Image (cartoon, grey):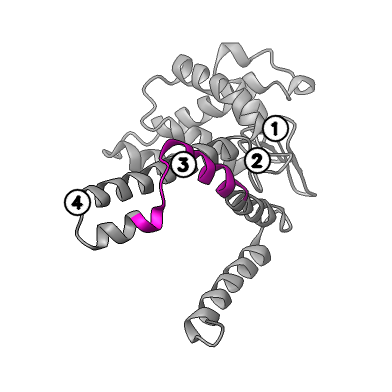
Amino acid sequence: MFNSHRFWIMWAGAASVIAWYFWTDPDGGAETLARLQWMLWLVVLAGPVYLLRKALMPGDSRTILQSALNGRVSAAIVWLGMCLLTGMLFLAFAGRAAASDFPEGAIRYLPVLLHEQRAYWPGMPLVSSLAAQVEQETCASLTSKRCWNPRTELKTSREYGFGLGQLTVTPKLNNFDAARKLDISLRDWRFSERYDPVLQLRAMILMDRAGFNRLSFVPDPHARLAMSF
């Protein structure tokens, strides 16, 4: 096996992909390591999955496979059942493991985002794009502390941005003041209270809606939404 060219090509290709992900990782390699850790959990899950499969469907899988290859239809059906059960158990365990890596802020603020969207832009053509916008603005990676965090800030010598929608303030452009003018509910929003996640999401939705409405000449709603972003 170790003398096979395909063996070395396979592992060299995998190592190259991991190295490329690590090199381009915007979070300094943290997201790449998190993905590798998640993949290692599949190895850990193999044991419980095997024991559960054996408990639910006892039998020697090699013997059943050999019988299926010899033309026994019943053995083939049992073999397929074993494969399906094993796959379903892996998906069940892996799904629970993946859910634990879901950003805590997303779990907390997605219902708020949906409520604000329904209240201030019920006709929004692609609701999921609002969540994608928050992720784009705040998440260097899904494991970053800034991901879905209303206190996320970007400070440079030219500009300052904050919050789930990253409202930008510069000497010439103040989107915080512009957002406050879009709805009466935002008029009393003070800069000292800028970390309020509800008002941040409301301002983001209202600014998106304003940009969308200015492009009324675009007939396709999804193209129009992309242009407004």
Give the label on residue 73, or none: 4
- CA gap between label 3 and label 2 equals 42 Å
- CA gap between label 1 and label 4 equals 56 Å
Q: Are marks 1 and 4 in contact (CB under 8 Å)?
A: no
Main secondary structure of the magenta stretch: helix
Helix, strand or loop under label 1:
loop
* Residue pointed to by mark 3: 53
Q: Earlier in the sequence, mark 1 or mark 4?
A: 4
- CA gap between label 2 and label 1 equals 7 Å
Q: Which residues are magenta?
A: 44-63
Give the label on residue 149, or none: 1
- CA gap between label 4 and label 3 equals 21 Å
Q: Earlier in the sequence, mark 2 or mark 1?
A: 2
Q: Earlier in the sequence, mark 3 or mark 1?
A: 3
Residue type, numbered disc 2: Thr
* The stretch drawn in magenta includes residue 59: yes
Q: Is residue 93 above or below residue 204?
A: below
- CA gap between label 3 and label 1 equals 41 Å
**Label 2 Cα crowd, 10 Å radius (few <14 / some 14-19 / many 20+):** many
Q: Is residue 97 left or right of residue 121?
A: right
Q: Earlier in the sequence, mark 3 or mark 2?
A: 3
Residue 219 found in image quarter:
top left
Give the label on residue 138, or none: 2
Foreground of the two, 49 or 38: 49
